[in-house]
Image (tube, rainbow, N blue to C red):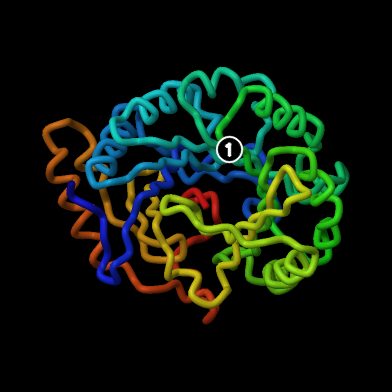
Amino acid sequence: MKQLQDGFGRKFYYLRLSVTDVCNFRCQYCLPDGYRPNGRQQFLTQPEVARVTRAFAALGTQKVRLTGGEPTLRKDFCELLSSVAETPGIKKVALTTNGYRLAKHAKQWRDAGLTHLNVSVDSLDPRMFHQITGENLFHQVMAGIDAALDAGFESIKVNSVLLKGLNDKELVGFLDWVKQRPVEMRFIELMQTGEMDSYFQQHHQRGEVIKQQLLQQGWQQAIREKDAGPAERFWHPDYEGGIGLIMPYSKDFCAGCNRLRVSALGKLHLCLFGEAGVELRDLLGADEHQAELVARLQSALQTKRETHFLHDGDSGVTPHLASIGG
């Protein structure tokens, strides 16, 4: 089988596929002023999603994550989900969501082929949750996680962006929460983007601090799977759940990169903090372009840089995380 491999020997098994830029939350670290449309956007259609997924699968991709914005705002979300899940070669279909529709639809999405779920919960304090997300929906989101546990997903992860001065004192509460729940709690370092320089300076919290606390409390680091995300994962014999840390400012973070991104407008992004993107949409309109699409993906990958330049304060052209799916 042909394979996606870059000039540094890294192989790519994981596609993060954005299906919309639109989001109904106003998270301080992403869209503090809410979603602001730039004209009338024509996001990828279901046939286009199916074609791009087939092309990646033909090159060894085994895992697809649907992202946004908030993916479940799409009226045809279930159809999109099914088309990805039915693609030969795709073994894992994941979703990153703010969870506001989860309580109602968890079983339906599971039945449609969703296997792995990530829900954003930046605080277990309803008031802090409201402050960070701009929405007073904490209890609705938590009810969604309960519904997801009942629906029997292969994996449920809860994402929390580390924010100094806001939720950075909640580690004990989150550890208590996963003690008897088969959920992986993931802490994500705040990443600098073009629209939030001052916010980053005020609230950036290093994940290394939490890592050292975990190791001191008997947590042990787990082995990383080849199609896993970028998190360093930890387990503890006394806990049913686990912990993950995503630390993009850590040494050698990019060495294990195994994921590529396609935006909701059909551009391939080789890095979350990279270039303007490689146009794919001109090849997504008909099945006869499939071989050319595969060739373009392979060619584009040879221009992928060895690392991002976040350490230098360079976040590339990314204005905010919702623009290419985080």
Instruction: Please state the horizontal and vertical placement of residue 254, each as a whole percent of the image.
Output: 45, 69
Say which residue appears at 78% left-offset and 68% top-offset. 213
Residue 55, quarter of the rendered image: top left
Answer above or below: position of 7 versus 226.
below
- 10 Å neighbourhood of mark 1: few (<14), some, or many (≥20)? some
Say which residue appears at 78% left-offset and 34% top-offset. 137
Is residue 274 rendered to the left or right of residue 103?
Answer: left
Residue sitting farthest toward the front:
237
Q: Which residue is mark 1?
A: 155
Is residue 322 rendered to the left or right of residue 184?
Answer: left
Answer above or below: position of 275 versus 100.
below
Residue 307, quarter of the rendered image: bottom left
Residue sitting farthest toward the bottom:
312
Does the rendering let one see residue 40? no
Element type at mark 1 = strand
Is residue 20 rendered to the left or right of residue 103?
Answer: left
Q: Is 219 or 324 nearer to us in this picture?
A: 219
Say which residue appears at 34% left-offset and 71% top-offset. 305
Say which residue appears at 66% left-offset and 34% top-offset. 99
Does the rendering let one see residue 289? yes
Answer above or below: position of 228 versus 254.
above
Tell me the kind of residue under disc 1.
Ser
Residue 286, quarter of the rendered image: top left
Q: Is 240 or 66 nearer to us in this picture?
A: 240
| Tag count | 1
Instruction: Please state the horizontal and vertical placement of residue 116, each as a whole percent of the image.
Output: 53, 36
